[in-house]
Image (tube, grey):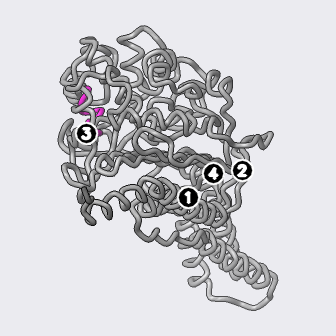
Amino acid sequence: MRIPTVVIKMSLTLLCCTIFLPTILVSANQDIKNELDTYIESYLEEYQVPGASIAIIQNNKVFYSKSWGVTGELEKQVTTKTPFTIGSISKSFTGLAIMRLVDEGIIKLGDPVQKHMPWFTIKDTEEAAQITIKHLLTQSSGFSTYTGLSISDKESTDIEAIKNNVTSLSNVNLTALPGEKHQYSNANFLILGALIEEVTNQTYAEYMEQNIFIPLRMQNAAADYESAYEKGYLSGYQSWFSIPRKSAVTYDNGGAPYGYITASVEDIVQFIKLLSRKDFENFLSEDSFNHYLTPHIQTGENRYYGLGIRISHPNSSNTMFWHSGSTPDSHAEMFYMPKTDWGGVILTNKNNHLEEEGLYYLKMGIINILNGDEPVDLPENTPSIQFIVFGFICLLFGLFIYLLLRLKSKKIYKRELWTFIGILGLILSIFLTPLFIYFVQAPWHTIQMFSPDLAILTVIASTFLAVNSLLAIKISLKKMM
């Protein structure tokens, strides 16, 4: 019996695929990894990042994992187990903790905060009574971004720091009614941290260790100063004119619920596995997990906020769950895309607010590479704003020399003109810093921590303005002597 030619051809094709397809796939994967190496290293070089760690997973397996550089005073080598502060990705874990308490029946999302924390209040006691747990999780309680920053980054090592920070809100006014609109604020998650402590009779760090980190096998994660350093955390670097300088900012116990959880890329990979629903099936009930990832409130075009996690393009083929995070000396990105099953985490140990968009572009470029597209061009890391302010200071210095020469001169000058110049300059010197604070909508201590170079330049500019103004006034008075 003769075997048909078509059957022979199909059999040979199948045999070739069986033999050569794994080799082709390995080669293709290696090409992607090589492209990732080149792209990531170009970012690290352009932004002068001292240390970084990145991991990418698909189908619940690590596809790419690599670390670069050093961290801390001792310049310890970074590995995939090195903990970094993960910034606002901490909010995603605080949200998880709240949903665990919901599953246990200890709290309900619709509960007013005061039901569990009778001592919690703000300036308007009626508005305080209206704030619910869900309002806090969706960032719609009415607390402004500015209010959240005003009680953030206090560098406290006190175990009562979270409660103390929340207590300091008692004289604060809301900028919107509870539930009225989304306003991203650290204050919301500080209150949730205090709520966890209140209903569990544990510190926030203890609860997170026992109910989040251990169940998710996050071995390097911590949520307080002592535990973080015991598990290998070392402070990172602040950026001055794009150049890394060892951080002058220390860990903040009071900031753990919104931004100071420490974790390694291996730890965040565990969280991404949870998001993929391929592991930790019993961690949350299906109803709670669905609620956690539901786009509850819109924050921009095709962007929403869940219960501590961001969601882009929900209910489409481009759905992505993600969160970014930054502290004064670290910057992080985390993402998971259900359709392609790609997930990733980027941890870096250098930050300046003016450089933060670079890591967002790196994340989007990595996603493009994984999807077979061209990576986005990374923006150049040129401290343009700092150079502009520095140029202004140089002009002020030149004016200072000119005024000194005028002061020593015996020539007669227009008294009214120099009086006007002096008074105008003095007013500008007084209001320069407040205007800067108003423009960026952040407290001065936040500006000092997240853009220390720009902060010191602003102080120098204000000082030169004041000195030059006083010299101008002295010149105007000189004619009268």
Residue type (three-letter) at the residue carrying disc 4: Lys
Point out the stretch of residues depicted in magenta: 133-141
| Closer to the eye: label 1 or 4 | 1
Residue 422 sits in which quadrant? bottom right
- Does 328 appear above or below 178? below
State how far apart marks 3 and 4 are (Cα).
30 Å
**Residue drawn where x is 37% and y is 46% of the image:** 336
Label 3 neighbour load within 10 Å: few <14, some 14-19, many 20+? many
| Closer to the eye: label 3 or 1 | 1
Q: Secondary structure at mark 4?
A: strand
Residue 355 sits in which quadrant? bottom right
Image marks 2 and 3: residues in contact by CB distance under 8 Å: no
**Residue drawn where x is 65% and y is 79% of the image:** 476
Q: Secondary structure at mark 2?
A: strand
Nearest to N terminus: mark 2 or mark 4: 2
> Horizontal and vertical percent for residue 215?
45, 19
State how far apart marks 2 and 1 are (Cα).
23 Å
